[in-house]
Image (tube, rainbow, N blue to C red):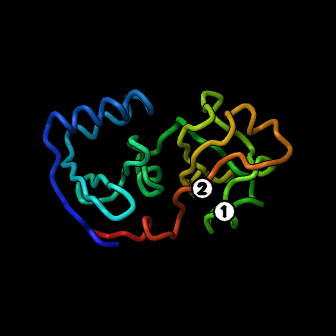
Amino acid sequence: MKVKSRVQLRKNVKNKMLKELVSTFGEELSYLEDKTLEKITLEEYSLILVDGKPLLFEIEGHLFPTVRGALEMGLQKRIVTVDKGAIRFVSNGADIMAPGVAAADPEIKKGDFVIIVEETHQKPLAIGKAIMGGPEMVEATSGKAIKSITHVGDKLWNTEF
């Protein structure tokens, strides 16, 4: 990935981002106030480095954790759990089909960005965009539930700075 620019965020920009994150995920992200945040503009995404680690990225004007960020921050909201049979496909970047969804945050609405985790250890596998609401995902017996955006092992996961 080619880096177009890299800048440290000013306090007012950082505070605005943190406010958005805390409103989405809760107070557990307020610890980011004490961290150094840098914005890296790449060809496809803008990444936010937290103390040099790519933990957040901008997508469609929203800030959301990367898979690595979801893993390190231990977030509890916007979670969709997939069963064991779906892990191999999700880890390879496949969209998530409704029959593979074991559980979903009931507050998820169509169009929300979500964190896909596996059933046994609750480890993040991918980040995606909900095609249906949380309760609907769990009840549906067919169709796509989530469009995959980034997953474990892709170029965003492997990015180092």
Q: Is residue 156 above or below residue 8?
A: below
Which is more toward the observer, 93 or 102?
Answer: 93
Q: Amino acid at mark 1?
A: Ala
Which is more toward the observer, 143 or 86?
Answer: 143
Percent coordinates x, y for residue 129 in the rendering: 58, 46
Q: Residue at x 47, y 53 (%)?
A: 71
Q: Is residue 88 above or below residue 123?
A: below
Q: Which residue is mark 2?
A: 148
Q: Could you tell me which secondary element the residue under label 1 belongs to?
A: loop
Q: Residue furthest right?
A: 141
Are the residues tagged 1 and 2 within 8 Å (C-beta)?
yes
Q: Amino acid at mark 2?
A: Ser
Q: Upstream in the sequence, badge 1 or badge 2?
A: 1
Percent coordinates x, y for residue 41 in the rendering: 27, 59
How many residues crowd around disc 1 within 10 Å: few (fewer than 14), some, or many (20 or more)? some
Classify the position of the C terminus by image quarter: bottom left
Percent coordinates x, y for residue 70 in the rendering: 46, 49
Percent coordinates x, y for residue 104 in the rendering: 67, 38
Q: Is residue 89 left or right of residue 5?
A: right
Q: Quadrant of residue 12?
A: top left
Q: Is residue 27 left or right of residue 40?
A: right
Q: What is the number of the mark on residue 140?
A: none
Q: What is the number of the mark on residue 94?
A: 1
3D distance between C-alphas at marks 1 and 2: 6 Å
